[in-house]
Image (spheres, rainbow, N blue to C red):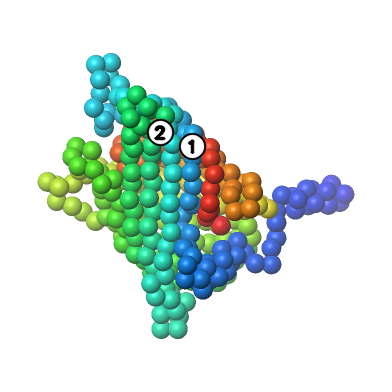
Amino acid sequence: MRLLLSLAVFMMSFTTFAAESVIDQRLKKEKAIKDNKFAIIPYQPTYILPFVFNDKISSNSSYPLGADGENEFEPIEMQFQISFKIPVWTNIADLPLSLNFAYTQLSIWQAYNTEKSSPFRETNYEPEIFATWQQDASLGLGWTFKMASIGFTHQSNGRSEPLSRSWNRLNSYFIIENNNLAVSINPWYRFSEAASSDNNPDLTDYYGHGKIRLIYKYNQNTFSLMSRNNLESGFSKGAVEAAWSFPIHDRVRGYFKVFSGYGNSMIEYDHYTNTIGLGISLTDWL
């Protein structure tokens, strides 16, 4: 009995039980921001990683290669992302239904490659419009269904051929939670394009048809783990991403991110990379 009690105390020390769930806390913060017309609602994490190491950047055949078979990019670069959403219409027909616009931009900058004038290697633009249905339905075993969304997403890198990459998709999310653990299930359907204009016809071979993300909040730390196209491709063309957001000072948080697989950016959708980055975040998933 003493052993069981000790084990229970040990397990509880690693779990935080809050009066409000982590999703409810996020929604409460969003509601407070909505009342301030000068504030922007966070969407995906907004961060700056001054130091990112990319171990496969020199062999990316999407870029022109030199006589040595490598391009002119440096393995250490900078990466930053901004992401926000705007509620277009809330409480539609007095239901927990809202229409939103969101925008996410990921930029990868060869800031330390002064020999080549420190160019921006890649920028991905991702506008979305989607409807969100909030719920609070028990699924049993401590799980609660919190929300679902569906909408249209465009993503491109704004480049001309042969470096142009883009796709349009019907995008959906289903979010469930259990105490401090939130799970986002994100299936999508890619809209087909004419063969003459499709510059990445095999994109879903690498991106698959959805991804799943686990987000865990412990005290002031947020941990996330993403898996994309691993089961669907038999672990041959998938990707995983792990991130840790931790407090530093006031609204600034430390941010550590590791990525391995295909699709680190659109220009790398069919190129396998391993990256590790450290910096700060201004907003997070929760």
In x, y percent, where is residue 181?
Answer: 59, 56
Residue under the point 43% across and 55% down: 83
Looking at numbered disc 2 in the image, what kind of residue is underneath it?
A: Ala
Question: With 153 as the anchor, is 140 left or right in this view?
Answer: right
Instruction: Please determine whether, in this image, residue 54 is positioned above or below residue 205.
Output: above
For disc 1, the marked residue is 50
Front-most of 255 and 207? 255
Neighbourhood count class around disc 1 (C-alpha, 10 Å): few under 14, some 14–19, many 20 upward:
some
First of labels 1, 2 by sequence position: 1
Q: Is residue 234 visible?
A: no
The span from disc 1 to disc 2 (Cα, nearest Å) is: 9 Å
Residue drawn 52% across the image and 68% down it? 33
Q: Which residue is mark 2?
A: 111
Residue 76, how many percent across, how many down? 44, 29
How many marks the image carries: the answer is 2
**Residue in the image at 59% along x and 53% along y:** 251
Q: Nearer the viewer, residue 96 or 206?
A: 96
Where is residue 140? Give x, y as percent: 60, 66
Pointer 2: residues within 10 angstroms few (<14), some, or many (20+)? some
Q: Quadrant of the C terminus?
A: bottom right
Position of residue 248 measured from the top left corner of the image (x, y, whole percent): 64, 46
Question: Mark 1 is on which residue type?
Answer: Pro
State the SS at label 2.
Answer: loop
Q: Is residue 8 visible?
A: yes
Q: Nearer the viewer, residue 234 or 43?
A: 43
Residue sitting at the far left: 196
Going by the picture, which residue comes out furthest to the bottom? 94
User: Secondary structure beneath disc 1?
Assistant: strand
